[in-house]
Amino acid sequence: MRKFLVARENIENVNVVQSEVELEPPSNVVNEFNPNEIVRDPAHKKQINEYAPDIQDQVRRAYILKGPMQPDLPSFPRTTFGSVKRSFSKSWYKNYTWLEYSEIKDAAYCFYCFLFKKPGRAEHFGFEVFTKSGYRDWKHASQGLKGHVGSHNSLHNSCVKHYDDYNNQRQSVTSKFAKATKESEELYKIHLTCSLDCSRYLIAQGMAFRGHDESSTSLNKGNFREMVDWVKSQNE
Ligand SMILES: [Zn+2]
């Protein structure tokens, strides 16, 4: 059985010391993903490492396009804590943009940790809870949500950084592509305008377009090609 070796990484402020861990790949890896059949409820989503490595990025992209699952329900189920009934509150979405709510499980999850957590990493408070089992301790939610975020170099914040880097990288590629497309469009327009101007002139003068030999080595490639080449040479 193939085994993966996870390299030691330097993580500060994590309670559990990270050691090299041998991990078994998930037994039922999914090899296909259809973005149109995306599962939104966080309790029913497959973990990213349950997809084959070559499609994991496609899965992340599809989820990022959808954004975190934050249903705006008129009310949320109430659970008794001691003598008081408490529930999830949609007002938490405002302060915690990563927060997802599962209607199926009445539980909270973290969108960024779902997307970028590294399997087999040391667990700390709230990391697995917010990605797999779901957080339901509404009584202590204010500490629980803050605790999941943790310090600036917590596992959660390292996932946030991955998310930002991923988005910046994609935006940079998209803008470069858009710029290249615009430049090639402009070049195409120049070539087209030049060809049309030459054609109009030849038609107006009743002159022949073609030459006897239009190959690249020909000394006279005919009126049209010679004229286009001449205009191009004037504009270079
Ligand atoms: Zn998180």
Image (cartoon, helix red, strand yellow):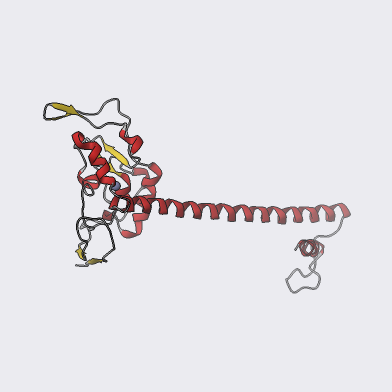
Dividing the picture into quadrants, the one containing residue 65 is top left
Can you tell which quarter of the image residue 123 is in? bottom left
Residue 35 left/right relative to 110: right
Q: Is residue 202 above or below residue 44?
A: below
- Locate residue 125 relative to residue 225 in the image: left or right: left
- Look at the image and tell me in which quarter the C terminus lies: bottom right
Residue 135, located in which quarter of the rendered image?
top left
Compare residues 140 and 29 and report the one nearer the observer. Answer: 140
Left or right: where 16 falls relative to 206: left
Q: Is 143 rendered above or below residue 48?
A: above
2 or 196: which is nearer to us?
A: 2
Q: Residue at x 36, y 46 (%)?
A: 63
Q: Which residue: 21% across, 64% down?
A: 19
Point 35% across, 50% down: residue: 160
Task: Give x and y (percent) for residue 119.
Answer: 25, 57
Query: Going 81% across and 52% down the picture, which residue do you hit?
Result: 200
Q: Position of residue 102 (x, y in %)?
A: 26, 37
Furthest toward the left, the residue is 82
